[in-house]
Image (spheres, coloured by chain):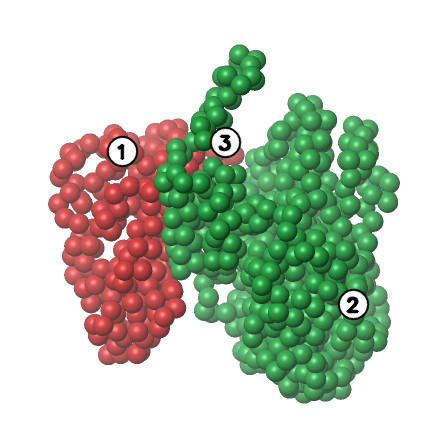
Chain colours: A green, B red
Amino acid sequence: MDLDSLRAIIASHHQDRTRLVQILRDVVAEEGYVSPPTVTRVAELLGLPRGQVEGVAGFYSFLGTEPRGRYRVLFSDDIIDELKDSRALVRRMLDSFRVELGEVSRDGLVSIELTSCTGLCDQGPALLVNGFAIPRLTPERIGAITALIRGGSPVSSWPTNLFTIHSHIHRRDLLLATPFAAGDGVRAAQARGAEGTRAEITRSGLRGRGGAGFSTGIKWSACAATPGPTRFVVCNADEGEPGTFKDRELLAHHADLVLDGMTVAAMAVGAQRGFLYLRGEYPFLVEPLLANLTARRAAGLLGPAIGVDLELHLGAGAYVCGEESALIESLEGKRGIPRKRVPYPVTHGYLQQPTLVNNVETLAAAALIAVHGGDWFRAVGTERSTGTKLLSVSGDVERPGVYELPHGVSVRRVLEEAGARDTQAVQVGGPSGTLLAANELDRRIAYEDVPSAGAIMVFDRSRDILGVVANFARFFAHESCGFCTPCRVGTTLQSQLMGRIAAGKASRKDVKDLVRLTRTVKLASHCGLGTTATNPVRDLLEKFRPAIDDRIGPLEARPAFDLDEALAPAREVTARDDEGAHFRERP
Amino acid sequence: MPTFTLDDHEISFEPGQTVLEAALAAGTYIPTLCSHRDYEPHGSCRVCTVKVNGRPAASCTTPAHEGDHVESATPELKEMRRELVQFLFTEGNHFCPSCEKSGDCTLQAVGYELGVTNGEYNPLFPTRRVDASHPDVLLDLNRCILCELCVRASARVDGKHVFALSGRGITKHLVVSAESGRLGDTTLTKDDRAVDVCPVGAILRKRRGFAVPIGERTYDAQPISKRVLEDER
């Protein structure tokens, strides 16, 4: 990339080092990747150590330090898409361009890879091409995309119907059915004052919707009580949990609720600046959100009149950045490595200042609580789980989409709403949550029972539950940040062992190894990603043990390598593929 | 002085000390790989994980508190530590008999200390680089355990930022600050602190390999637990 273009990019980000991830996103949009000379120049222009720039470029999936095709295609590898045969679509495109996964085609035109869930499980299979999301893939659509890539025109000029994201909100309650206009929350918060607003949030019993369920009132009060020259509010819109897409719907169709909520939060804790950290998979939300922010400034809902301003910050493909301290590191232009717990972000957050990080849905609820009060909110739900929950339902159901239901609702009721039949298992809260068997459907979505950040993935009896869990294990291995030993190595070993088990190539020793390693990963990991990364395997071992035992067979141990696979190079050079060229295990 | 209990022993500590520092000062060994008294701890290897009032925590980053109940030498935590060392042997390419760091290597010594006799898992056998481009220093990434001590030493003591980490998850790797990716093109010199801080055989001084014969090296003479506690005194 030439120096002038690079200078222009860096100038557009005000030479600000904390915007390194944004700067590198712009570099990749032009150059396709971050080349070694570009790393050097970015480092020089920003006055950063070269290694820091290379480290950041190498950390995020959507950046990268290796050359990519002029068209970079990333297929979503989530389980829901996999069950809709996304792998056949991937194969089709690979064959069409005569490349393998991760390779760049010889003419440099295209490279095809897998990525984690792109937040479109209600309308998958899905892919991203040069950052643009394309849902509802079929062989026909793959054919059209392949032709467009061959045609060589920029993705921004492709037919717009390819990129249309459908909205699927099937049930509305407290959050989605209560009338709300831009500024309602801000005006209510002005009338109540900072302390009065915080009191209503506390009274409402609202708890963090990102999954951990920490009391929002306590968090806001702790942030407000921490002295600092300045404070920050961050909206965590990095919903990376496979199977989740409710924040996408909130930001697409109820953005005023969220932006009002951010402003209310800033006013209530005394913050002047707020960031909306949007996951990089949602580029289609960028323009509408920027337009909304501009309109708010014009209407006096942001800016000097209020003493609060908000800005958009894009992620670059890293699930771990949903962890609040990793998100802050990313906002500061660093690798998304979770910080040590204590101090917490409410006292030492963005730039070491008191920082409030809340989930999109939490802030949307806060805007309405500012208007209607805490009692209005806590009238719905259960005692310890007040209000409603937005659930992203996908998988083997007739009507995938978002359902807003009161906390305390049974899983069975959710399945009835969405039209599930012959259910074998339900993954509540995404891979890091809880795998429920068919006899547990009366359990309730609530912090008292099965907490959930919102993903409900449904699997009927035709599905291979071992394959499902192998997909989850692959996800965690792909998304481990690599900071600590147990998560970095353990998630990879877990994925290998789970893959062997699902493929029927494992032994009893493999299962023993899996049991032992999950204990270590859970006990020793640095952050929540590692401590939850073994949940699906733990639940599988506990609830679906017969399925594992049936698959592994009687052998105590097996060779570490696949004997048949080891013969593959010999088959290739001899151009043989007959029975005698394969190793078959004797029954 | 305030105190806490460590495996049923009362341990006194100075305010500001971590659980690890207090334990070592009191003569109780807790194994570590990524911590070093000269650098701020970050808790990445997790080998020093203990349970503080029932909750797992890295002892190197956890401040000691009056009245805490800390478990360290329990069967559960010992197994976890063995397993973490096995993870590291599985992850990299570690061949002690042919490694010139053998006998001076912290990973090997902690492995012996914890009774690790094999890697247990199928080795990942990653393809990693050996960089001999520097006149005085050899970089062999096959043995790197990603403890970041060289990163910290180069940044904070040498003021050079020669080393950094890139990649993510199992592909995380050490990089050097040169467009060519070669150590010889960095500003590293043989007097840098970063050269000697490596606990394994990833960063080695050239032409020193067998100056001390095997059998007479640091951990040949005594196990690492004794050595660490002696250094503490």
In the rendered image, the residue lying farthest to the front is A587
Mark toward the viewer: 2 or 3: 2
Marks 3, 1: nearer the viewer: 1
In the rendered structure, the answer to whether residue B69 lies left or right of residue B227 reads: right
Q: Can residue A308 be seen in this view?
A: no
* Quarter of the rendering occupied by the N terminus of chain A: top right
Give the residue type at disc 2: Arg
Q: Check disc 2 and report the residue beneath it.
A: A171
Q: Which residue is drawn at 62% across and 77% down?
A: A385
Residue at x 64% of width, y 86% of height: A203
The residues bearing labels 3 and 1 have C-alpha atoms spaced at a distance of 27 Å
Disc 3 residue type (three-letter): Ser
Say which residue label 3 marks: B180
Residue at 22% from the left image edge and 60% from the top image edge: B29
Label pair 3/1, CB-CB below 8 angstroms: no
Q: Mark 1 belongs to which subunit?
A: B
Q: Mark 1 points at which residue?
A: B99
* Numbered tag placed on residue A528 in the rendering: none
* C-alpha distance separating marks 1 and 2: 64 Å
Q: Position of residue A347 (x, y in %)?
A: 52, 73
| Chain letter for mark 3 | B
Return the x and y of residue B144 as percentages of the image width and height. 37, 41
Mark 3 neighbour density, 10 Å: few (under 14) some (14–19) many (20 or more): few
Residue closest to the eye, A105 or A27:
A105
Q: In this view, does A362 lie above or below A460?
A: below
Secondary structure under the numbered disc 2 in the rendered image: strand
Residues behind callouts 1 and 2 on a single chain: no
Above or below, A548 against A451 in this view is: above
